[in-house]
Image: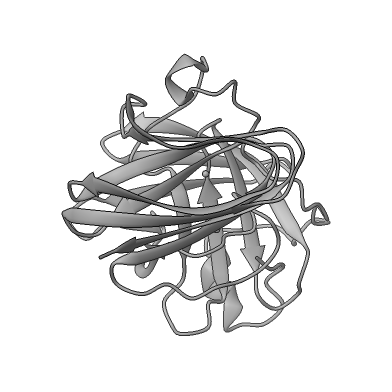
């Protein structure tokens, strides 16, 4: 299982509150954070299904800041002011819905996950909240952008990925899948504990198709095995 770059202005500095040193050189990489899976999210040791896993964006129609907490304990931060510049790092849970994010450049920040509103914010900047993004995040998918609407999510990537998404309502969800490649394309839906819920694709070679699946509202993961680019749209029918 949907980014931009450095804080250059005082307006964007809110996304970096807590930094006490000059901004270090950013890491210019588009490498997806999600590591290859072996076909089953539950079978891959070390994966985290913590509720904080996902792509979180600053408020507003046009986001200024995005942070991804991935299932492998890695993070990637992006600021919209400078495209294609990223801060990679790691995250660990401190308990009580608090998470320590350590950039590869050495800076450390504490993030808090507000379970009641399903938002995250920096401990030293509680007034700026970031919401879960259901579109195409660069860190968990291929470079690109998308909007998300209630009852729908658009996700994409290249190769093997474990991508989180949230079913915003209970009912019949329709998954529209597109894949380009010459090897297996396998997609499992797993629950927030990594348990397999449904197999929605098991194909060899380039594929386009639709698969309905009943889901209860909640957080899920798409465990994708692929050798090329893919997109998956999930919509509540």
Check the image and report above or below for 158 versus 235: above
Asked if one can make out residue 133 in the rendered structure from this viewpoint, the answer is no
Q: Is residue 29 left or right of residue 188?
A: right
| Quarter the C terminus occupies | bottom left
Residue under the point 41% across and 62% down: 153
By what rule are the colours in the image chosen?
A: one colour
157 and 185: which is toward the camera:
185
Asked if one can make out residue 112 in the rendered structure from this viewpoint, the answer is yes
- Looking at the picture, how far across and down is residue 55, in whole percent? 48, 55
Check the image and report above or below for 134 versus 162: below
Q: Is residue 15 left or right of residue 206?
A: left
Check the image and report above or below for 161 versus 144: above
75 and 142: which is toward the camera:
142
100 and 90: which is toward the camera:
90
> Disc count in the image?
0
- Looking at the picture, how far across and down is residue 39, in whole percent? 55, 24
User: On the image, which quarter does residue 133 sit in?
Assistant: bottom left
Residue under the point 70% across and 78% down: 81
Q: Is residue 128 left or right of residue 84?
A: left
Residue under the point 51% across and 54% down: 209
- Looking at the picture, how far across and down is residue 53, in whole percent? 43, 43
Residue under the point 17% across and 55% down: 171
Q: Is residue 87 left or right of residue 133?
A: right
- Looking at the picture, how far across and down is residue 181, in whole percent? 75, 43
């Amino acid at each position: 299982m949907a980014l931009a770059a450095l804080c250059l202005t005082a307006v964007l500095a809110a996304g970096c509150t807590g930094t006490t040193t000059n901004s270090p050189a950013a890491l210019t990489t588009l490498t997806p954070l999600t590591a290859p899976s072996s076909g089953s999210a539950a079978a891959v040791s070390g994966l985290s299904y913590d509720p904080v896993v996902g792509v979180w964006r600053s408020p507003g129609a046009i986001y200024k800041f995005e942070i991804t907490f991935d299932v492998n304990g890695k993070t990637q931060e992006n600021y919209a002011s400078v495209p294609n510049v990223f801060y990679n790092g790691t995250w660990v849970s401190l308990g009580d819905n608090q998470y320590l994010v350590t950039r590869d450049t050495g800076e450390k920040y504490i993030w808090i996950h507000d379970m009641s509103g399903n938002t995250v914010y920096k401990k030293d900047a509680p007034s700026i909240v970031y919401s879960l993004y259901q579109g195409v995040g660069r860190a968990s998918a291929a470079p690109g952008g998308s909007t998300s609407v209630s009852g729908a999510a658009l996700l994409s990537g290249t190769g093997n990925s474990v991508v989180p998404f949230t079913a915003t309502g209970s009912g019949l969800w329709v998954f529209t899948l597109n894949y380009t490649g010459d090897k297996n394309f396998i997609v499992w839906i797993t629950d927030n504990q990594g348990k397999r819920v449904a197999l929605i694709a098991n194909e060899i070679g380039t594929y386009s198709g639709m698969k309905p699946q009943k889901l209860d509202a909640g957080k899920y993961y798409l465990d994708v095995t692929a050798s090329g680019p893919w997109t998956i749209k999930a919509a509540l029918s």
